[in-house]
């Protein structure tokens, strides 16, 4: 018996473990939830880990999944064992190459963490929509349902592909399986060596292209032969299922786990059977066992090999007694007469039964249904609902299960109290904050229990869609038997609340069973704990006889030097009171794992964690529960009752964590949502907020412009308004000529501020008596919350400034404009959102935004709410996200429409001049809309036009009325990150810039794929460590601005707000005013840089001062006037590149992991900076002749 | 002529030692110093803050923002083996030992007992010939008492002495109420040498930004008088070796220090200012003077002008102060 390690890992790691060992070339590109597979592969190769043939696989990141599949195709054609990892849109981009790879009968396995394909909305979560889109490519499709299966099937699929020559997609459910942490048995290298036949590997190599034995592949064929030639592959597909089964059998002999093309579990004489694939089979398995123990006769047929679909094997696996079958598809094909698996089952039965090729007593009735889209929960009660439906005389076909579909009434009713989990399973739910380390501690607990005891362990983690102050919910199971519950813990016997504030927001005890334990982190003495609970929580504790424990974890953390991290403390509490392990043993094991986890980070870190463990036990108390409810307060509504009905009834419910309960009818049919909704979410996540000192303030607007969340604002107004101001409302005499006679206020939104401190950092004013104080200073939020809320409400009620009277081309002037991008879900201290906010202030009332997928699309439009807002007239940015790769083209489409519509509207104006009136038409046609005053006048003209048109009852008048608004100049903004602009979308961006049309491209350059966790892009600087560049990026940063300049007719600017905010404002205004394509590359500091986010603006300054990111504006209009179009806006490098780089962990960590390489790359990067500067200096110094017609 | 001397039991070819400073961070420049004739080098200091900070900083950045958002559960590649500041330092000791034959003295700079004393052991294992402990403590607390401060020094020394066998020198500041007694206590606690004195870098104020800024000035020759006096006072009164540090810029300074009682003289600022080529100049000057004054060995010179041996012991005491004031008038 081979000795195999027990490991607690997630599905992605399980797949990567095998893929990295049995491949030679791996082409990767990040996409959630598959990115981690590529990350593991890259890191293992960077660390020198070898495959089973003793060589290190070559891992290459590409510019897109399309590129990755192309590289895979090429590597395969030249004989390498090659793989890739992807999901969703990424898999869709691979489809063209998949047809080719399959058509050429090439052995490979793509590992896919199956994810929803974007339709009415994007979703990062799991279903089979992407995999189903590949059915026609000719790839085999093989499914795994658990972490163990993922590791096993990754190997089986590869072995089978080598023999069958059919390429395979090995898929498993995104997040549910890819991110579920499980204790599994790890396959050993020897297992892989035995499974992979070297003769087949050599045969694969022998088929490769080589000039030593030249062949021609990829010909063009005509109607005479294509069809026949296409049919040549038939025998390979016919043999494929038996080859897969052969390798499953071989695997069973070697490893001991047995799989079949279709595995049946349940009563041998079952009358009802469900058929499904992916993680849902595990829940179905659990439910079937439970139901059969309770007298039913049911079964589940697990589909392993979905393509090629082996009908014979399928029907052979069904019990002969089956009378009715429900086929569950985790996908939706609108317009089809059923989902794919359902139709395959029907076809198999319909073809084989009449021919007598089944052992079935009768032809079973088959119904199909949808479940689990976008990782919607699939629980045992849903499986039971399906079995119950099958009992009916006329079961519902084409049903949905797991939602309340109340429009066409397809859904089945489920019993929420039906539970199949055994009493021997510890089921724990932990509510924490991302920043408090709860998830990390829980992953640690799973490792302790999984690897140090005989128990099985499972962990699944639910994250927030907000990046600042985000909540995490950890679902953990431990038990003596394998765990098949592939759904969230919904009957918990242990619940922990790691943050007091959650008592006000979430119904945590709804998950608790009778007699459960509730652990609470509460900053108060134990005798006051009960009184701190809301009424409903007290009631639940009494009703469910819950044991209550409390600890003041932040105090323990403070005492033991843990700062704000309470992870180790709460983990210790869990072990101390859950009884999952004997207390002493558990504590010893926590300490051991602390040593293992933190050992590499230094002895100090270990010591302070150990101290925290010891202190915890002394501070954890059981709280005695009185017999009755005593509290005088309860959870407030999720959003203000003043919010619009849709916000209260739909968005508010999502915010409160009750989105699962919303029915279909609650939602818009086409994915259209109102804007201006973030203001209803009062998140109160800042511990400290900035407080204004009106006497010290110089009213420069710097604090407002850098605020990532638009929570610090300026207004100047007539002092008369102060009469009804709240007592604590502050004001000062407004400085500047344009504010003569006015007062001004700098106001903080106390409940929306994230407490990032960027504003305080950039404040240039100092208190004369006490220089540590500035014009804004951080103070604790709670004591200020009520009074500042009142002040902020009053501030918002003050009239807005007249835009036409402000000098908006300055920092100060621009900051008197109302932001139309506010309170986003971005990280505290984010370096991107300022630019969007500035754009929204300057042009938001006439902007239309095309947003590439990425951080900006997530903090911009992840439900429940959006930061894109509206002004008092109801105007504001209109926003849409198409895809990641096509954003430039998408925004270009906006421009085409607008250009066409303006042209058409002008044509109609000309035609209807008599009816409308010549003066108005001339005014509309000749309007100068270059500034705010001109735009305001045009708005008035358009209003007059509309009034006129409403009086004319002609088709043409109606047409013009429907288009009249386009006569006010619109501003098209194409927004995205560097992953989009430098990599996946570059081809399209290049084309759009070359088009000459008036679009404004804003690249939020964070120098990595931030949203997917910091993978390397072509914007990543040399020497920086990023995912997919674990050994430090060897190549320099691509100079996107320089490339765009080469067209000559593109306005290009490099901006970095932290280095020069005034230049930034000017660049935005000039870019927007330029009647042609504009590109703004905006340096955006990022949490993925490993910086102290408070110092974000300082790092921007260093990026510029070191020459890494020179500031400039390249204006084609200057060229037309005979001037040099390039204007350098920053000075010669004044600090060393090192001073910029080594203030950031992304560079510094390489000096720790690979000092030699770090040194080498630093020298090269220093040269890059110097050379870049010299080149720009040269360019900016050239004498130019006036050029005509460059526009 | 014999220039050799003994420092904390280390046999040195001459009394010129490169003091802790940036020059010793680079193997190449240490080699150059050896070629130029330096007898030993004291490495740049490994700071206690560095030991604590490097680990804490890396931990912070690797964990900050993680496990918060489904698409970005982490922001950096998974953990690999990191060589933190202290490890780099240990690596540097080994590199220097491989590159040069002269003794390499490591330097630990800190102010709290515990924790970093482990590194003394690691430094020893990495091959350092001796260790200089630079206890850089500015007693800013109004409740810090002199005995507490003094005890802190003793505790650190004892802890380090317990953990290593290589000689340990204490590099001290001149700001003790009873310097001689303090040194005597440390001497009794096992210090193998004293480096006198450490220079506190005094902060400055930037009048434009109104920020307190660190100000680093190289020493000048005038500053050698302070250690000179204490060399003279301490010579022959303690068991430990004496290294003079601060303000040694010319051959005359070296000579004076040895005459006052120094076993070695540490040079740093002069090398930073004028380069490694100053080493032969200093040694040449020393030899020239010895020849001129018919000294055969350093041993003969050592302490010949110390308080114990000189004609006018009071000159190193308060009387000297009066004389100095009078001469100024």
Image (tube, helix red, strand yellow):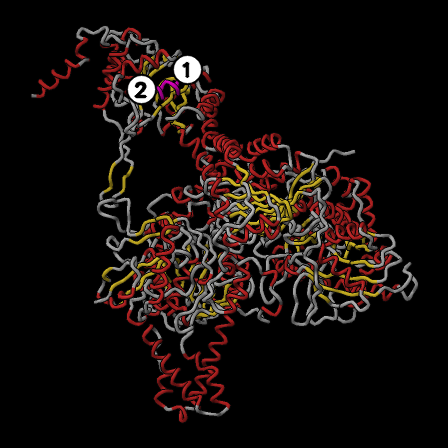
In percent of width and height, residue A382 lies at 71, 58
Q: Is residue A434 visible?
A: yes
Same chain, labels 2 and 1: yes
Q: Which residue is mark 1?
A: B167
Residue in front for this viewpoint, A71 or A607: A607
Left or right placement of residue B169 versus residue A74 in this view: left
Q: Looking at this rendering, what residue extends furthest in the front direction?
A: A627
Residue neighbourhood size for the residue with mark 2, other residues' Cα within 10 Å, grouped as few (<14), some (14–19), many (≥20): few
Q: Which residue is mark 2?
A: B147
Residue B154 within the segment the image draws in magenta: yes
SS at mark 1 in the image: loop
Q: Is residue B37 visible?
A: no
Residue neighbourhood size for the residue with mark 1, other residues' Cα within 10 Å, grouped as few (<14), some (14–19), many (≥20): many
Q: Quadrant of residue A786?
A: bottom left
Q: Are marks 2 and 1 in contact (CB under 8 Å)?
A: no
SS at mark 2 in the image: helix
Q: CA distance from mark 2 to mark 1?
A: 26 Å
Q: Chain of mark 2?
A: B
Residue in front for this viewpoint, A471 or B75: A471
Q: Residue at x 28, y 17 (%)?
A: B284
Is the stretch drawn in magenta largely helix, strand or loop? helix
In percent of width and height, residue A262 lies at 81, 54
Residue in front for this viewpoint, A957 or A1104: A957
User: Upstream in the sequence, badge 2 or badge 1?
Assistant: 2
The residue range painted magenta reads B150-157
The answer to whether A708 is drawn above or below residue A1155 in the figure is: below
The label nearer to you, 2 versus 1, is 2
In percent of width and height, residue B156 lies at 39, 20
């Amino acid at each position: 018996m081979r000795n195999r390690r027990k490991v607690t890992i997630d599905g992605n790691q399980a797949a990567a473990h095998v893929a990295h060992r049995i491949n030679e070339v791996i082409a990767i590109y990040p996409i959630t939830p598959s990115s981690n597979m590529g990350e593991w592969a890259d890191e293992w190769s960077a660390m020198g880990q070898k495959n089973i043939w003793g060589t290190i696989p070559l891992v290459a990141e590409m510019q897109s999944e399309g590129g990755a599949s192309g590289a895979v195709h090429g590597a395969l054609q030249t004989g390498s064992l090659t793989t890739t990892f992807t999901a969703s849109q990424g898999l869709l981009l691979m489809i063209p190459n998949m047809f080719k790879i399959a058509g050429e009968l090439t052995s490979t396995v793509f590992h896919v963490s199956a994810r929803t394909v974007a339709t009415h909305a994007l979703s990062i979560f799991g279903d089979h929509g992407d995999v189903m889109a590949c059915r026609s490519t000719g790839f085999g499709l093989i499914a795994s349902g658990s972490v163990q299966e993922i590791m096993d099937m990754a190997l089986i699929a590869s072995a089978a592909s080598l023999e069958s020559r059919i390429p395979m997609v090995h898929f498993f459910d995104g997040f549910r399986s890819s991110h579920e942490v499980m204790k599994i048995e790890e396959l050993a290298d020897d297992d892989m060596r035995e499974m992979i036949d070297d003769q087949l590997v050599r045969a694969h190599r022998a088929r490769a292209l080589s000039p030593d034995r030249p062949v021609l592949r990829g010909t063009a064929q005509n109607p005479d032969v294509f069809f026949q030639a296409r049919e040549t592959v038939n025998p390979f597909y016919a043999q494929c299922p038996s080859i897969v089964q052969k390798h499953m059998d071989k695997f069973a002999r070697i490893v001991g786990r047995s799989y079949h093309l279709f595995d049946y579990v349940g009563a041998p004489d079952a009358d009802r059977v469900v058929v499904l694939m992916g993680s849902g089979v595990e829940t179905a398995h659990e439910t079937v066992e439970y139901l059969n123990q309770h007298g039913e006769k049911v079964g589940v047929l697990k589909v392993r090999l979905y393509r090629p679909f082996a009908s014979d094997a399928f029907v052979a696996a069904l019990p002969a007694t089956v009378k009715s079958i429900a086929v569950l598809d985790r996908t939706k094909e609108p317009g089809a007469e059923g989902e794919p698996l359902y139709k395959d089952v029907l076809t198999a039965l319909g073809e084989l039964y009449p021919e007598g090729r089944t052992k079935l007593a009768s032809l079973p009735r088959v119904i199909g249904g949808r479940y689990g889209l976008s990782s919607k929960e699939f629980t045992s009660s849903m499986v039971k609902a399906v079995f119950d439906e099958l009992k009916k005389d006329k079961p519902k076909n084409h049903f949905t299960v797991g939602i309340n579909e109340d429009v066409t009434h397809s859904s089945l009713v489920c019993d929420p109290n039906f539970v199949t989990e055994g009493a021997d399973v510890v089921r724990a739910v932990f509510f924490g904050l991302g920043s408090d380390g709860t998830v990390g501690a829980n992953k640690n607990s799973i490792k302790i229990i999984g690897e140090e005891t005989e128990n099985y362990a499972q962990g699944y983690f639910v994250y927030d869609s907000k990046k600042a102050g985000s909540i995490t919910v950890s679902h953990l199971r431990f038990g003596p038997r394998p765990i098949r519950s592939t759904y969230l813990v919904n009957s918990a016997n242990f619940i922990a609340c790691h943050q007091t504030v959650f008592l006000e927001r979430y119904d945590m005890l709804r998950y608790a069973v009778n007699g459960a334990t509730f652990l609470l982190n509460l900053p108060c003495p134990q005798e006051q704990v009960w009184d701190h609970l809301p009424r409903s929580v007290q009631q639940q504790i009494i009703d469910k006889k819950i044991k209550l424990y409390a600890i003041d974890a932040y105090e323990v953390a403070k005492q033991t030097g843990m700062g704000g991290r309470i992870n180790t403390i709460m983990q210790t509490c869990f072990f101390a009171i859950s009884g999952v392990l004997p207390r002493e043993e558990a504590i010893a094991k926590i300490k051991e794992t602390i040593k293992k986890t933190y050992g590499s980070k230094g002895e100090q870190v270990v010591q302070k964690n150990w101290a925290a463990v010891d202190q915890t036990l002394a501070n954890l108390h059981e709280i005695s529960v009185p017999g009755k409810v005593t509290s005088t307060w309860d959870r407030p509504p999720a959003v203000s009752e003043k919010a619009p009905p849709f916000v209260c009834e739909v968005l508010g419910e999502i915010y409160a964590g009750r989105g699962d309960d919303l029915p279909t009818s609650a939602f818009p049919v086409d994915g259209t949502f109102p804007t201006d909704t973030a203001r209803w979410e009062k998140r109160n996540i800042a511990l400290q907020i900035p407080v204004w000192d009106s006497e010290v303030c110089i009213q420069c607007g710097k604090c407002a412009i850098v605020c990532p969340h638009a929570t610090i604002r300026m207004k100047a107004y007539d002092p008369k308004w102060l009469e009804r101001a709240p007592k604590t409302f502050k004001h000062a005499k407004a400085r500047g000529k344009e504010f003569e006679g006015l007062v001004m206020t700098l106001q903080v939104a106390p409940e929306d501020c994230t407490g990032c401190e960027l504003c305080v950092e950039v404040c240039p004013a100092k208190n004369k008596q006490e220089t540590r104080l500035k014009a804004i200073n951080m103070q604790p939020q709670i004591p200020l919350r009520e009074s500042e809320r009142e002040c902020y409400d009053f501030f918002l009620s003050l009239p807005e400034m007249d835009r036409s009277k402000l000098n908006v081309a300055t920092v100060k002037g621009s900051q008197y404009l109302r932001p139309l991008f506010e309170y986003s879900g971005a990280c505290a201290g984010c370096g991107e959102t300022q630019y969007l906010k500035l754009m929204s202030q300057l042009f938001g009332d006439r902007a239309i935004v095309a947003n590439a997928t990425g951080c900006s699309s997530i903090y911009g439009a992840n439900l429940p709410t959006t930061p894109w807002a509206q002004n008092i007239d109801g105007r504001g940015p209109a926003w849409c996200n198409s895809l990641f790769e096509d954003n430039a083209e998408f925004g270009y489409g906006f421009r085409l429409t607008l250009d066409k519509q303006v042209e058409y509207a002008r044509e109609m104006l000309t035609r209807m001049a008599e009816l409308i009136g010549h003066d108005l038409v001339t005014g509309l046609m000749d309007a100068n809309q270059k500034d705010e005053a001109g735009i305001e006048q045009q708005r008035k003209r358009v209003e007059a036009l509309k009034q006129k048109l409403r009086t004319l009852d002609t088709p043409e008048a109606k047409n013009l009325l429907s288009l009249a608004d386009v006569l006010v100049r619109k501003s098209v903004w194409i927004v995205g990150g560097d992953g989009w602009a430098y990599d996946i979308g570059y081809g399209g961006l290049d084309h759009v810039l070359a088009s000459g049309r008036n679009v404004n491209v804003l690249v939020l350059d964070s120098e990595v794929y931030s949203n997917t966790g910091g993978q390397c892009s072509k914007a990543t600087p040399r020497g920086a460590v990023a995912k997919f560049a674990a050994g430090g990026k060897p190549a320099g940063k691509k100079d996107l601005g320089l490339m765009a300049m080469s067209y000559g007719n593109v306005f290009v600017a490099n901006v970095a707000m932290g280095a020069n905010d005034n230049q930034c404002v000017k660049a935005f205004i000039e870019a927007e005013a330029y009647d042609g394509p504009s590109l703004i590359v905006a340096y955006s500091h990022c949490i993925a840089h490993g910086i102290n986010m408070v110092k974000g603006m300082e790092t921007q300054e260093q990026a510029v001062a070191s020459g890494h990111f020179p500031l400039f504006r390249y204006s084609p209009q200057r060229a037309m006037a005979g001037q040099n179009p390039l204007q350098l806006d920053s000075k010669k490098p004044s600090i060393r590149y090192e001073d910029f780089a080594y203030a950031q962990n992304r560079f510094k960590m390489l000096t720790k992991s690979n000092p030699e390489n770090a040194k080498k790359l630093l020298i090269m990067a220093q040269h890059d900076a110097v050379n870049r500067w010299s080149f720009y200096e040269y360019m900016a110094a050239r004498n130019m002749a006036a050029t005509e017609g460059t526009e | 002529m014999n220039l050799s001397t003994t420092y904390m039991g280390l046999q040195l070819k001459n009394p010129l030692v490169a003091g802790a400073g940036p020059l010793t961070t680079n193997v190449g420049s240490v080699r150059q110093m050896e070629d130029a004739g330096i007898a030993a080098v004291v490495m740049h200091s490994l700071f206690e803050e560095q030991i604590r900070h490097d680990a804490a900083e890396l931990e912070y950045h690797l964990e900050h923002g993680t496990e918060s958002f489904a698409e970005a559960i982490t922001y950096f590649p998974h953990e690999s083996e990191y060589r933190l500041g202290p490890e780099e330092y240990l690596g540097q000791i080994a590199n220097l030992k491989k590159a040069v034959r002269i003794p390499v003295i490591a330097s630990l700079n800190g102010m709290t007992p515990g924790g970093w004393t482990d590194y003394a052991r690691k430094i020893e294992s990495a091959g350092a010939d001796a260790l200089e402990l630079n206890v850089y403590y500015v007693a800013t607390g109004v409740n810090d008492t002199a005995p507490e401060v003094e005890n802190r020094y003793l505790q650190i020394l004892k802890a380090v002495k317990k953990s290593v066998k290589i000689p340990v020198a204490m590099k001290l500041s001149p700001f003790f109420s009873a310097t001689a007694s303090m040194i005597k206590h440390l001497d009794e606690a096992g210090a193998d040498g004293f480096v006198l004195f450490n220079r506190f870098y005094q902060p400055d104020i930037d009048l434009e930004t109104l920020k307190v800024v660190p100000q680093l000035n190289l020493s000048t020759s005038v500053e050698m008088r302070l250690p000179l006096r204490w060399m003279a006072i301490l010579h022959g009164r303690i068991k430990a070796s004496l290294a003079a540090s601060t303000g040694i810029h010319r051959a005359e300074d070296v000579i004076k220090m040895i005459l006052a009682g120094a076993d070695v003289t540490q040079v740093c600022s002069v090398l930073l200012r004028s380069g490694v080529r100053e080493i032969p100049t200093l040694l040449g000057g020393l030899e020239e003077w010895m020849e001129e004054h018919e000294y055969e060995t350093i041993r003969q010179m050592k302490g010949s002008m110390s308080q114990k041996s000189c004609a006018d012991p009071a000159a190193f005491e308060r009387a000297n102060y009066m004389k100095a004031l009078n001469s100024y008038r």
